[in-house]
Image: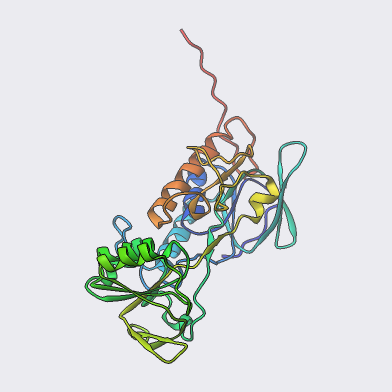
Amino acid sequence: MTAELPPAVDVLVVGGGPAGLSAATWLGRYRRSTLVVDAGQQRNLPADRGHGLLGRDPTTPHELLAEARAGLAQYPEVVLRHGTVSSVRKDESGRFCAVVDGAEVSALRVVLATGVRDRLPELAGIQDHYGTDVHHCPACDGPTAQDQVVIVLGSGDQVPAYASELLDWADTVRIVTDTTDPCFGEDQRAALADHGAEVVDGVAEALVGEPGALVGVQLAGGELVEGDKVFFSYAHHPTHELALELGCELDHEGGIVVNGFQLTSVEGVYAAGDITAGLQLVPIALGKGTAAGVACATSLRGHPTHGAKPAPPTRRFRSG
């Protein structure tokens, strides 16, 4: 995937997940020279299966990425590179100057598709189980817990609502608060009890059982909370460092604010995927990436291209 780094392109896409690759696909269709820089840190890569994608249900994240990357080969204007963008700034002429793996690249437009990073539970065995029977997204993986016993880990105020989502599928939901002190109010506990959700005040220490055959979660005091699957809700952190450097407006959760065309508050900078507000699902990331790619490409009409082929001509129409 690592390709020679072009010194200048029409569009720099930062992030090679579903949103970034979707944007690049449409930029290629519009014949715009595009560099996609992918650090290979897509949040769903640990998952055994991805669900709910029309025509590809289920698939694996690796298969989806491989096919998307292969599809870009039909667009010679698109270059896909494994690497890191450490800095992006806008100069006086309105061009963007990026540092990619220590080298400078200039671009007329930028698409940010950098996603978010999830905070994982501090549990023995988490790396072996994550994506198999430990998950973070109820909408993505909740249906796989149908009629099973689900353990929910987390201590924030959002946890009761998060746990209640899983009651759409699970037979039983057990919340481990990850603290020995009660952290939910009596009203919250009463509401959970009304819906058959149990609350255990304790600190989760280890996962018990083999990946795919989970027995439960062992607490710091030695108690075993039995369950077939674990879902967790602690925090996820938007990777918005480049957006901050560019001066993009952020919302209260750190996501990049965009309009209906995925354009940020900085002219020439677009954003798509989980780094923007809304549901964080692969089908939605694909749609947002498509919108960003098309809007970005059409904003370049009349601008010369840095690709091997000439840019599409500027069209002027006369009325009457």
Task: Decide if residue 304 is on the left or right side of residue 18.
Answer: right
Picture residue at 31% right of the left edge, 63% below the top: 191
Q: Toward which corner of the image does residue 100 lie, by quadrant? A: bottom right
Q: Position of residue 20 (x, y in %)?
A: 51, 53
> Is residue 209 visible in this depiction of the protein?
no
The answer to whether residue 30 is left or right of residue 189 is right
Colour style of the rendered protein structure? rainbow
Describe residue 247's horizontal placement relative to residue 48 as left or right.
right
* Residue 301 visible in the shown view: yes
Residue 118 rendering spot, x and y as whole percentages: 51, 67
Of residue 68 and residue 257, the one placed in the foreground of this image is 257
Q: Position of residue 82 (x, y in %)?
A: 60, 64
Toward the top, the furthest residue is 320
Residue at screen point 51% across, 13% down: 318
- Is 41 positioned to the left or the right of 204 in the image? right
Q: Which residue, as the protein is rendered here, is positioned at the far right?
A: 92
Query: What residue lies at 48% left-to-right and 10% top-to-bottom?
Result: 319
Query: What residue occupies the far front of the structure in this picture?
Result: 186
Decide: is 195 above or below 12: below
Residue 177 vertical position relative to residue 215 in the rendered view, above or below: above
Q: Which quadrant is the N terminus positioned in?
A: bottom right
- Residue depicted at x 43% and y 77%: 130
Q: Nearer the viewer, residue 83 or 270?
A: 270
Q: Where is residue 238 in the image (x, y as percent from the top left)?
A: 56, 58
Frontmost residue, 253 versus 43: 253
